[in-house]
Image (tube, rainbow, N blue to C red):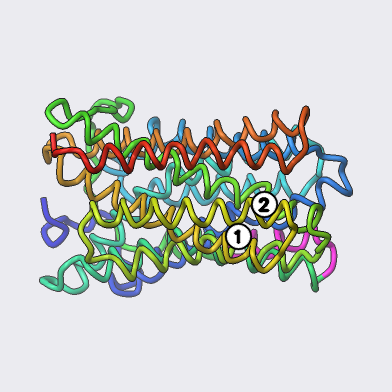
Amino acid sequence: MSAQTLPVVARRTVSHGAGFWVVASAFLIAMAFTVVPTPLWPLYQREAGYSTLMVTVAYAAYAVGVTVSLFLAGHLSDRLGRRRVLVPALLVEIVSGVLLLASTAFPLVLAGRALSGVAVGMITATATAHLVELHAAARPGAGRALAELVGTAANMGGFAVGSLTSGLLAEWAGAPLRTPYVVYLVLLAAVAIGVALVPETVTPTRAPYRPQRVAVPAATRGRFVTVAIGAFAAFSVLGLFASVAPGFVGGTMGHPSRALAGLVAFLTFGSAVTAQLVFARAAARRQVLGGLTSLSVGLVTATAAVWLPSLPMFLIGGAAAGAGAGLLFKGSIGTVFSIAEPATRGEALAGLFLAGYLGLSIPILGFGVATAVVSTEIALAGFATVVVALAAVVAVRSRRPVS
């Protein structure tokens, strides 16, 4: 059923057009909140005694929360309604923020990060679908281009905005381990109220609950495995720059500025969304191959910068790696769209996201464990070697005849 014919199942309190921008704002703020701790991790290490391993475990808790939620709750809006999932998800994120604000004790931070992941798993697909449907209802026949563009910008762009604003607040607003959370809790509460007033676009059904199925297209399994490895590598790099990279700047390179730590993640994620938008019309295969090159060159550059050390070189490497990761993942999604049957496309995409979020947790945990026995520089070199090797595997497999 198209969005134009979907009945509105709750009293409209704002128009579909206004609702579109309310949901877009909520999507952006929700994604931004998930990286508020990114420029703060060096502070957790200095003031709360966190080790690099503890930081990576806290980050992995977020990834696990996203993965579990994605498959248990991410698709519930199709049967319950978009708003009925978005509002509770925003409330879960508020609870996460309260836990992170309350204490730097590791168990509370771990729980807060896991709940943040649960909220994101509920929000990502729901908000994306809601944007498309609200836009179609507000402007029938206009196509999905604007909705998809805004969804992409809110998703990856939120990560860029969140890390930068958190770093700036921590640097100049005082109480650096509290102020960013307070600001985002206020914003989350505001957008939760706003989303509650947005028109519903799905009629609730009584269909029996089942977890999201994961499927690999049997006829094109080789190509699916190729892009799944690519998604794993892309998310590994994004995870590195969202978790421990600010620590490189403050520790190894001797630049303790929280604003600078936020800038590192901002450049990485901002480059990712910029690359996705600039090369949006390129063929999926070109996006994958171009992304592999940029990701590999950027990661090697950033690794060399830590060994030298050189902050400008590290920032350039992070931007190139982020652009490559964003392009690689977009090309991977495009490939899955092209090889999966429409009836199983959602299940195939779920498999791709599973590979991506495994990349967001396993390599970062491995890096954290490695720092317990070797230096940060050696652990980073090992991380980069593994990711570049995976990129090489994807490049070789992508050049094989289509199967």
Q: Amino acid at mark 1?
A: Ala
**Between residues 95 and 314, which one lies in front from this camera angle?**
314
Residue 175 locus on image (x, y percent): 84, 62
**Residue placed under numbered mark 2 in the picture:** 245
The kind of secondary structure the magenta stretch mainly shows is helix
Q: Residue at x 69, y 35 (%)?
A: 110
Q: Amino acid at mark 2?
A: Ala
- Give above or below for 168 relative to 209: below
Residue 278: numbered disc: none
Residue 265: numbered disc: 1
Please tell me whether mark 1 sits on a helix, a strand or a loop: helix
Q: Residue at x 33, y 27 (%)?
A: 211
Quadrant location, the C terminus:
top left
Q: Is residue 272 left or right of residue 284?
A: right
Q: Is residue 348 left or right of residue 58?
A: left
Crowding at dot 1, Cα within 10 Å, few <14 / some 14-19 / many 20+, comes out as: many
Q: Residue at x 22, y 68 (%)?
A: 145
Please tell me whether mark 2 sits on a helix, a strand or a loop: helix
Residue 350 locus on image (x, y percent): 32, 36
Residue 207 locus on image (x, y percent): 22, 30
In whole angstroms, how far apart are the C-alphas of marks 1 and 2? Answer: 8 Å
Q: Find the magenta span and give its range.
A: 174-189
Residue 347 locus on image (x, y percent): 25, 33
